[in-house]
Image (cartoon, rainbow, N blue to C red):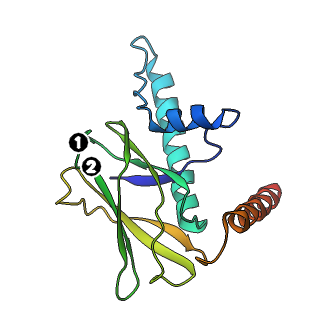
Amino acid sequence: MTRLAYVSNFGEGLEEEEKAAKWLAEEPEEPLPEDLPEEEIKKREDEAAKRAAEETEETQTVAKRKGTKVHLHGENLLKTKALQVRFVTETEPPVAKIAKPIFKNNKMLGLTLPDMGEQLEVGNHMLTVEVSLNGQQFTSNGVKFLYMMVDPALSEEDLRKLEEDEAKTAKKGKKK
């Protein structure tokens, strides 16, 4: 696995049922047109690399909590029944959670961040995420992201308000 990216505004404008179906669906890779000039291929590759760098920076500086949708990017991913993702904290002792991803294509998986459990203190924590195709051996790429452990006593309404406040703060930060 090479990187993790937060999924923003997923399924905006879709009904909940359509949004859920879209999230579960595979997303075939779009091949480049064969007659594309070399400079256009280079331009697209540069744009993709820039977007990947921005997404990676976001995962290092903006904490996300349970329920956030993410994409895991890699190479040669396979759709198997044993496909798993493991999240591990850097705390002592470490806290680990296993989650079942959604296979999107051979370069991307979809996943909703799990609740890391009450043994993790409320606050921001750096987590390492790894993938297993067989449920036994996990990658060791060391891909990390910032996770926000919220108070387990918060209701869904409280979490929604917190999310709205974060969105407003993020918009203010971008205007500067």
Q: Which residue is mark 2?
A: 83
Give coordinates of residue 61: x percent, y percent.
59, 67
Say whether residue 102 is left or right of residue 140: right
| On screen, residue 15 above or below 77 | above
The residue sitting at 40% across, 32% down in the picture is 26
77 and 20: which is toward the camera: 20
- Secondary structure category for the residue under label 2: loop
Corner quadrant of residue 103:
top left
Q: Could you tell me if the residues under marks 1 and 2 are in contact, i.e. CB atoms within 8 Å? A: yes
Observer-nearest of 34 and 170:
170
For disc 1, the marked residue is 80
Give left or right: position of 38 versus 94. right
Residue 30 lies, in percent from the top left, at 43, 24
Between 70 and 174, the residue placed more toward the observer is 70
Please state the horizontal and vertical placement of residue 16, each as a whole percent of the image.
Answer: 63, 38
Residue at image x 25%, y 63%? 140
Is residue 80 toward the left or the right of residue 22 in the image?
left
Q: In the picture provided, is 165 more to the left or to the right than 104?
A: right
Q: Amino acid at mark 1?
A: Thr
Mark 1 neighbour class, 10 Å CA radius: few under 14, some 14 to 19, many 20 or more: few
Q: Tell how many labels.
A: 2
**Residue at far top of view:** 35
Task: Please tell me whether mark 1 sits on a helix, a strand or a loop.
Answer: loop
Amino acid type at image mark 2: Leu
Q: Crowding at label 2, few (<14), some or many (≥20) Cα neighbours within 10 Å? A: many
- Residue in the picture at 46% in, 17% down: 37
Residue 81 screen position, x and y as percent: 23, 44
